[in-house]
Amino acid sequence: MKSLSPTEAIELINSDDGVRIVDVREKWEYDIVRLPHSELMSLSNFQKHISNLNPEEIILVYCHQGVRSLSVCKYLESNGFINIINLSGGINAWTDEVDQNMPRY
């Protein structure tokens, strides 16, 4: 598993149309702020979403500060996923480094 800073992650997203962006926060958090083109797959019911993911695709996982996403990344790796990336610092760091106009909570 890799971890990327928000600056590194935006470079990857901009250079590769095949990156799947998965948000593991809760719906109320997703409704406040989210990364463009992200899919909500809340940690609280993540296991029901795993069948919708391809173990070989590039998946960028994020949450608020990077803790929940790290646990999901470890879980995915233990289930045979090979291209998992954790967004270090989560959307909180993204709003500091990439887009300061995004809402914070």
Image (cartoon, grey):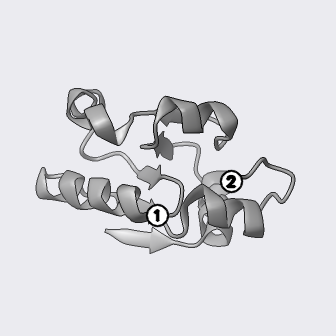
Depth check: 65 or 88 in front?
65
Amino acid type at circle 2 is: Asn
Task: Tell me if 51 is positioned left or right of 35 in this view.
Answer: left
Depth check: 60 or 93 in front?
93
How many marks the image carries: the answer is 2
Task: Tell me if 55 is positioned left or right of 103 in this view.
Answer: left
Residue 30 location (% of width, % of height) = 58, 35
Residue 38 location (% of width, % of height) = 56, 37
Residue drawn at x 51%, y 30% as measured from the top left: 27
**Relative to 9, is 45 above or below?**
above
Q: Please tell me which of labels 2 and 1 falls first in the chain.
A: 2
Report the residue marked by disc 2.
Answer: 14
Depth check: 85 or 95 in front?
95
Q: CA gap, disc 2 to disc 1?
A: 21 Å
Residue 92 location (% of width, % of height) = 64, 61
Residue drawn at x 28%, y 29% as measured from the top left: 49
Quarter that holds the N terminus: bottom left
Question: For numbered disc 2, what is the local secondary structure?
Answer: helix
Task: Tell me if 87 is positioned left or right of 105 in this view.
Answer: left
Report the residue marked by disc 1.
Answer: 66
